[in-house]
Image (cartoon, helix red, strand yellow):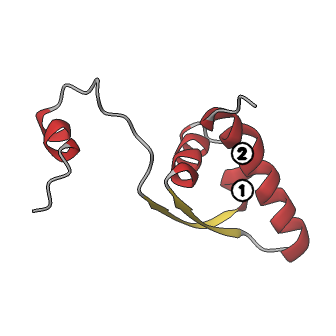
Amino acid sequence: WEFTFQHMADYDLPAIFTYVNSKTKQKVSYIGHSQGTMQMHIALSKRNAVVESLIDKYFGFGPVAYVSHANSSLVKLLDRKVVL
């Protein structure tokens, strides 16, 4: 299996939203954590028509991210996982 966040955002999220809407006849409230947040960020950044038309509310927590190539001093500081 070689699925990427991109695949999940392009295919899985629209399929899930369509299925939920077909059963409930309501828009979807989505809570994502980690991988789920990243998938929604991708879907929304690509302006996925199905997701945009069927989403009601979106709450995203702790997106997956790698910052090893970031040049920003702020990002480097936050990457230290220091609790202030």
Where does residue 33 sit, x and y in percent of width and height?
Answer: 51, 59
Residue that mark 1 sits on: 53
- Numbered mark located on residue 49 in the image: 2
The quadrant the N terminus occupies is top right
Does 1 sit left or right of 75 as displayed? right
Which numbered tag is attached to residue 66?
none
Label 1 element class: helix
Quarter of the figure that contains the C terminus: bottom left
Type of amino acid at the residue the image marks with label 1: Ser
The reply to whether the C-beta atoms of the residues labelled 2 and 1 are less than 8 Å apart is: yes
Q: CA distance from mark 2 to mark 1?
A: 6 Å
Q: How many marks?
A: 2
For residue 63, side relative to residue 27 (left or right): left
Q: Is residue 70 above or below residue 12?
A: above
**Residue 18 horizontal side relative to residue 9, left or right:** right
**Residue at point 78%, 74% (across, down):** 26
Q: Residue at 82% across / 67% down in the picture?
A: 20
Q: Is the residue marked by circle 1 packed among few (<14), some (14-19), or many (20+) residues within 10 Å?
A: some
At x 25% / y 27%, what residue is drawn? 70
Numbered disc 2: secondary structure: helix
Q: Amino acid at mark 2?
A: Ala
Closer-to-camera residue (59/70): 70
Mark 2 surroundings within 10 Å by alpha-carbon count, few (fewer than 14), some (14 through 19), many (20 or more): few
Q: Nearer the viewer, residue 74 or 51?
A: 74
Which image quadrant is residue 7 in? top right
**x%, y% of residue 55?**
66, 62
Q: Is residue 19 left or right of residue 13?
A: right
Image coordinates of residue 64 in percent, x first then y, are: 45, 45
Identity of the residue drawn at 17% across and 44% down: 80
As drawn, 79 above or below 56: above
**Image location (x, y in percent) of residue 10:** 71, 38
